[in-house]
Image (tube, coloured by chain):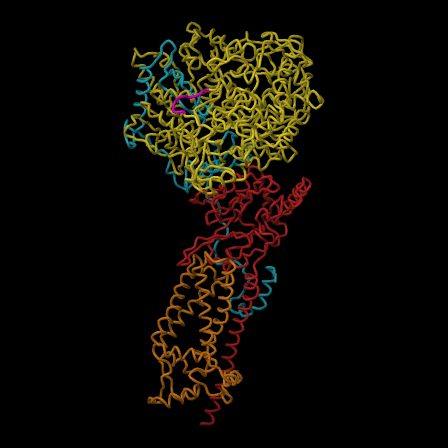
Chain colours: A red, B cyan, C orange, D yellow
Amino acid sequence: MAKAILYDTTKCTACRACQVACKGWNELPAEVTTNRGTYENPADLSPTTWLKMKFREIEPGGKVRWLFTRRSCMHCTDAGCVKVCPSKALYHHELGFVAYNKDLCTGCGYCIEACPFDVPRSDRNLLTGIAKMDKCTLCTTPGLDRIAEGWEPACVKTCPTNALQYDDRDKLVAEGRKRVDSLRDAGWANANLYGENELGGLHVMYVLDDHPSVYELPVNPQISAATVAWQDAIQPLGWAVGGLTVLGLGLNYMVARANINREKEKKDVAGS
Amino acid sequence: MELSRRDFLKASGAAGIGGVFLFGTLDPTAALAGVPRFLPLKNKVKETTTICCYCAVGCGAIVTTYEDETLKIEGDPDHPINEGSLCSKGLAMSQVHQVDGKPNPLRLTRPLYRAPGGTAWQEMDWGTAIETIAQRVKATRDATFDEANSRTEAVASLGGGELDNEECYLLSKMDRALGMVYLEHCARI
Amino acid sequence: MSQEVEKYSKPTRILHWVHLVSFCILFLTGLVLFIPQLGFLAQDSVTRVIHRIGAVVFIIAPLIYIPMNWQATKRGIKEAFSWGASDIGWLKAAPRYYFSGDEKDMPPQGSMNTGQRLWWLIVLVSGAIFTITGLIMWFAKTSAPAAVLQWMVFIHDVAFILAGTMLLLHIYLGLFHPLMNEAWKAIYKGNISAEYAKKHHAKWYEEVAKSKEVKS
Amino acid sequence: MTNHWIDIRNSDCIMIIGSNAAENHPISFKWVTKAMEKGAKLISVDPRFTRTSSKADIYAPMRSGCDIAFIGGMINYILNDMERNPGNYNMEYVTQYTNAALIINSNFEFDDGLFGEVKDGKYTTDAKNTWKYGDTKTPAADPTLKDPNCVFQLMKKHFSRYDADTVCNITGTPKDTYLQVCQTYTATGQKGKAGTIMYAMGTTQHTYGTQNIRGYAILQLLLANMGVSGGGINALRGTSNVQGSTDMCLLAHILPGYLNVPMESDADLDTYIKRSGKNPDATITPQGLAGDKSSNWWGNSKKYVVSLLKAWYGDSAQTANDFGFHYLPKCDPAKNYTHIGMFEAMGEGKIKGLWCWGQNPAVGGPNSNGEREALGNLDWLVSADIWLNETAEFWNRPGADAASINTEVFVLPAACSYEKEGSISNSGRWAQWRYKAVNPPGVALPDLEIMNLVMLKIKELYQADSSAPGREAVTNLVWNYGDVNADMVAREVNGYDLTTGKLAASFGSLKDDGTTSSGNWLYCNQYTEEDGNKCARRGAVDAHPKEIGLYSNWSWCWPVNRRIIYNRASVNLDGVPWDSEHPVILDYDSEKKWQGDVPDGGWAPINQAKEGEKYLPFIMKPEGIARIWGYGRVDGPLPEVYEPWESPLDRNLMSGTKTNPCAFIGKYRNERSTPSEYPYVGTTYRCTEHWQTGIMTRNLPWLVELMPEMYVEMDEVLAAEKGITAGDKVVVYNARGEVNAVAVVTKRFQPLQVGGKTIHHIGVLNHWGYSGMSTGDSGNILTPHVGDANTTIPEYKTFLCNVRRA
C-alpha cells in the first residue's frame, strides 16, 4: 500500500515548523543566512535544508494574497533521480516514495540534473569532485527511520493546522479530491489536486486553490529528454555494443586461432 | 519517448546480453554490496514531558534523551491542545540546551560579575555572588526604608513571565517582604 | 637475425603508454557508473577522484607531446584524415583476413592500416569530446543549467561507448590476435621486423626502405 | 482567555483583531482551522496583511490604533439592527445578563470627547460619580430598554456618531469590507451561535488599550457571546507563563490572586478591605430583572488576604497584629509604580537596585535608549537568566562608555524550562506541570533555588542586625524550604487547613480567622489531599457529555478547574443552554446539580430558584451582571475615539479632544515626534520565528537561519517614494532614536486613506538587540514612554517615524 503526504496550501500558515522539524529529526545544522527582503529563508534547498517554505505575494483583482508553498522532494513514481542514479543509492521505498541510502551515493550529481522539481542538492568540491547528495528521504534515513517505527514524517507530525497529512495514498487522493471539490464550490474554479497523476503519481500531493503556475509549480513536470535518451536508449545500446564486441572478439579469437593454426599446420606439412 | 521503469529493465535486459554475460544480472534492485538500508534508532535514556517555554498556548512537548547524551524535542501527541504539533520555536527549544549535539555555547554556565566602571566580566562563585547580592539588597533597603509604609522605593524587581508559578510565587513573596513596590514583569509591557 | 625497422619513436611510445594507462583508468572508473553492482566502489566519490587524476594525465600528456614532436603530430593528424579507395578495399577484405588469416585481398598499407587509422581517428575525436564535455562537467557542474549538464553526460557516454568498445578491439588486436604478433613489439620496443613491416605496412616499408638505411 | 484554546473550534465566527495568532500563537490555528473546516468564518483586522490574514475569509485593513472607531462602528451597527430585527439577537441575554437595562445617573454628560471634567489628567470624583447607576446600591432596570437613561439608550446615543462613513474615514478601511465585517460578525448574535474575539498586544498597547478591550467586551455581550462555548474574549498571552506570573501578581498594583495592594491610607486590614471595594458591602442588587441576587464573589476577599498573610507570616500572623498586614508594603497613590513609572524613577536616580528574573527591559521596555541610559543610574543590577542578555550587558552596549557607568552587575546562570520542575499557566488558565529532563549547564541553577539562596542569606543578615528598619517583615517571613523544590511550594500556594494540617480543598473553604493559609486563593484546589498535584494530570479523554473539548481531567485550571468562565451565562433563565450542540453547563437538577463544566456557582437556574436566591450569572461583578457600561475605568464608562500620543493627523476626526486625557506621559528622555518631520505610522510586532526580546530565539541557530536579521516592513508606494527596494538596508528614525534594518517591501502593507490623507505604515520588529548570536537594533528604540490610562501599558503599537536608505 503506497503512502503519501498531502499538503493543503489553503490550511498552511507558513509557520515553518516543518522546516525546523526536518532539521531537528534529521540532525541537520542551521545555515548562515541573510534577510533578502523576504521572510523566505534559507534562500534555497541545500544539503542541510531538505525542506523549505516559499512565500509569494500576489494581488489578483486588487486583493492581496500571500501564498505559501512547500519545496521538498515530491517522491515521484516516475522518478528521474532513481532512473539516473548509477549506484542505486536512490530507490523506491516499498511504500512508494523515493528513499535514499547515502552510504551508496557516489556524488555524481545526475539526480540533481534529472529532477524535474530541482530538489536534490550536494555540496561539491569543484576541484576533486567529492560530493554527497542530500534530499528529503521522507524520514527513512537509516538510523533515523520514522516510517519503520510506524510514525509519520517529522514535518507532518508537527504541522499545527494539519496542512500536512500522511496516510495511504489512495485515501489522501480521495481526501484531496474532496478538498478540491469544496474549494471549487467556494468559488475557486482552478482548484486542483497537484500530483495525483503527475509523473506517474507523486507521493507528495498538493491541494491548490489556483493553477499550479500561480504557486510556481511546474505545470506538466516531465523527465527530461536527455534523461530518457541517455537512460533508455544509450545505456542499453552501450551494453549491447559492449556485449557484442566482447562476444565478437571472443569468437574471432577462437576462429582465427583455429584457422591460423590450420594454415600453420598446412605450411608445416608442406614444408616438411 | 516515455519508457516506464519496467520497460527500461526489459529493454536493457534484452539489448544488454553482453552485460548479462559479463556481470550476471542487470537487475538494479538486487541486494547491493552489503550497505544497510535500515538501522535502528539510537538508544533512548528517557522521555520527559514538558510544556513549551515560548508563547502561552501551553503546548505539550516530549524531551527525549539518548545514550549519546543528545536530546530531541517533539510535540506530545497525547496533549489535547497541540496533539503532537509544535511551531518552529517550540521545536527549536532543544537548541536552548544543545546545538548540533553539543551544549549551546551561549548559555550562561557560572555567575559573572562586573565591577563599577569595569569593562569586562569576571567569574564569581555562587557563595560570593549570593553573599554580595544579599548585602547590596540589605544596604539599599535599609538606607531607603519608609517604616510608616513598610516599603522601599529604591529597590525594584522585574520578572518573570518565563518563571514557573512556584518561582513567581516565591519572588512575589520575597519582593513584598523586602518592601518592594516597584515590582513588575512583562505582563505590563 | 632478420632486419628491423623503427616503427614508433620513443616519445610516441611514451605518449601511447601514458595515454593508454590513463584511458584505462578513465574507462574503468567510468564503467563503475554503468554497473550498479559495482556502485559501492564509487562510494565517497573515490572513483571520481581517480577519474580526475586520470583525466589530468589524459589531457596533459598530448599537450606536452605535441610541441616537442610537432612533425610527428602533423603527420599523424594528416594521416587520420587521409582516406582513399584502398581503405574501402581494406575494410572489405579485413573480416576475412582477421578470421582466417587470408591476406590475398588486403591492399598494401601505410604506416597505419585502415583499421589503425580508424581507431586513431576515434581516439582524436573522442579524446576531444571527452575533454570538452568532461571539463564542462568538472568545472561547470554547479553553474551550468541542468539540461546542459545532462546532454554533456549523454555525449560523454556516447563517446565512452564508442571509444570503450574500440579500445577493447585495440587491446585485443595488439595483445591477443594471432596475426598481430609484432604490433605489441612495435609499440613496446619501437622496432618491428622488416618482414612484418613488409607484410603489414607494405607502402610504408617501401618509403622507409627508400629513404633510410635498413638496420640489420 | 475567558475560554481556552481548544474551544475555538466551537466558534461560528472568529474575529482576530489586535492579534496575529497564526504567527504569534501558531498552534491556535489548529483550532481556528478546525472551526473553519466546520464552516466558521475568519475575520482578520490588522494594519498589515499577516499570515493570519492569509487564511481569513475577510481581511479588513485598519490604521493602527483605531480599534475603538472600528468596534464602535460595529456596536452602532448592532444597536441599530437590534431595534429593527430583535429576533436576530439574544435579547434575553442582553437585558437579563448585562447592565443594558440599568438606569444611569441622570447627571451623566458626554461632551466633545470628554465624560465630564478632567483635572491634571484625571476625571474629577464628581465626574466619575455621574458614570454610576442612578441608585448605586439597588439600581433600577428597564427591561424594555426604552428609558433614555438606561445603558442601552445612552450607548445608542454615544455610538450613533460611529456611522460607517465616519469610522472608515478614521480607520482607512474600505467601506464595503467594513460592512461585510459588521454583517458577518453580527450574525453570531443569534441564539445558539457563537463568535469569538482573539486579541493580543495589538489591542492593549495603546494609551486607550483598556478601552479597546472594553469595546470588544461590549460587542461580545451585545451578541451574547460571553460564557458560551466558541465565544468569549480571548486575550492570547504571549509568554509561556505570563498568565501564571500575573496570577501570582508580580505587578505593582495587585497581590497574588488579584487582591489589591495596600495603600498608604490603609491604616489596618479592615480599612484596606473597605477601600479596595472587594467586600460584602459593595454588593449591588439590580431591581426589575429576573435575577435578584448577586453573589459579589469579591466580597470574600478578606478570607483570601488573611490566608495569604498566614502563608507568608505563619505564626507571626495573628488576629492581634492584623495577621501581619502591616508587613506588606503600602503604596503612594500619587506614584506610578508600573514599568514605565519604574524607569522614570530610575532615570531620576531614585531607584538604586534592580533585580531581573528572566526579563530583559533593555530590549523589551519602551524608548530603549532612555531605559538603557536609566539602568546606568543603578548602584547594582542582578540579572538571573539563562543567557547573557542586553540588560546585563547594558554597560557594554554600542556607544556606551563603560568606564563611566558605575553600576555593579551580577549575572546569575539559571536553568531553562526543561532543566527544572514546576508548573506554568497557559493563556486558557491551565496550570500544567513540567518535569526536568536534563541538568542545567555548568553550575547553573533553577531560579527557585537561586531565590531560596538569596532570601536565606538576606534573612540571615537581618537576623544578625537587630536595628535594621522593617526587620520583622523579613525575619518573620516563613521561609523554611530547606532544599527547595517546586512541589513544596505548589502545596503552599494551594494552602492548608491549619487546624488539621491538611491541604485546603478549594477557596470555598478558606477563612478570614487565621485558620487557613493559601499563597494564592485562585490556585487553591490545584493540589488536594484526594487528587494530589492536579496540574500534573494527564487525562486525555474529554469527559464533557457533549465533548465540547474541555478535557477537564488534563492538568488543572483556575478557578476550581472551570474551563469556560462566566458559564452561567451560557444557559437561559430556565437553565437551558442557548446552544444545544455546544452546551457548557447543562441538565440541572436539584440532586445532581449541573453537568458539564464546573459552573460559575452551582445555584439553580434563575427561574427555578426561590425569591431572593435567583443568582445573577456574572459572579465577580458586584451587580451580578456584565457591564457593557463599565464605570470602573479611570477614563470613562464607554470607549471613545482618541488619537495615539503620536498621531499622523492634526486633530481627532471624532471630537475636539485629541488624545486620551488620562494617558500616562513619561518625562524621562521621552521626545515627541511630530507628523511634519515623521509622517509615517510606526508599529511594532513579532514574527513567528522569534520571541519577545529575542534572547530566547536569537541564540538558537535554527531560528536565526529562518529570520536572520532585524527588518522593517513597508508598502510598495512608500518604498518607491524613498527609492527603497526589498533587501535594502534602511534607517527608521524618529525623535527618540534610529533603527537600522533590512527593508521588506511588501504588498501586505497598503497605503490607507484617512481624513483626506494618505497614511503609510512602517512595521518594526521588536526582537533584536546587541547581545547573543544574531544582533541588531531594537524596535523599541522608536517607541514612546507613554502608557494606557488604566494600566500604563506602553503605546508600542502606534508612533511616528520616518525612513531613509542607509
The stretch of residues the image draws in magenta is D664-670
Quadrant in the picture for the N terminus of chain D = top right
Toward which corner of the image does residue D802 lie, by quadrant? top left
- Of D234 and D122, nearer the camera is D122
Q: Residue D666 colored magenta?
A: yes
Residue B19 left/right relative to D348: right
Residue nearest the viewer, comparing A46 with D95: D95
Give the camera-side residue of D744 and C152. D744
Residue D504: give x, y in percent of width and height.
50, 16
Q: Nearer the viewer, residue D756 or D793?
A: D756
Note whether residue B51 is visible: no
Picture layout, residue A117 above or below residue D448 = below
Q: Is residue A161 above or below residue D135?
A: below
| Rendered location of residue C176, percent (x, y) | 45, 78
- Label total for image: 0
- Horizontal and vertical percent position of residue D444: 36, 31
Q: Position of residue A78 (x, y in %)?
A: 59, 56
Up the image or down, D467 lies above or below D408; here it is above
Looking at the rendered image, the quarter that the C terminus of chain D falls into is top left
| Residue ranking furthest to the top | D320
**Is D105 positioned to the left or the right of C193 in the image?**
right
Q: Residue at x 56, y 59 (%)?
A: A224
**Can residue C60 be seen?**
yes
The magenta stretch spans residue D611: no
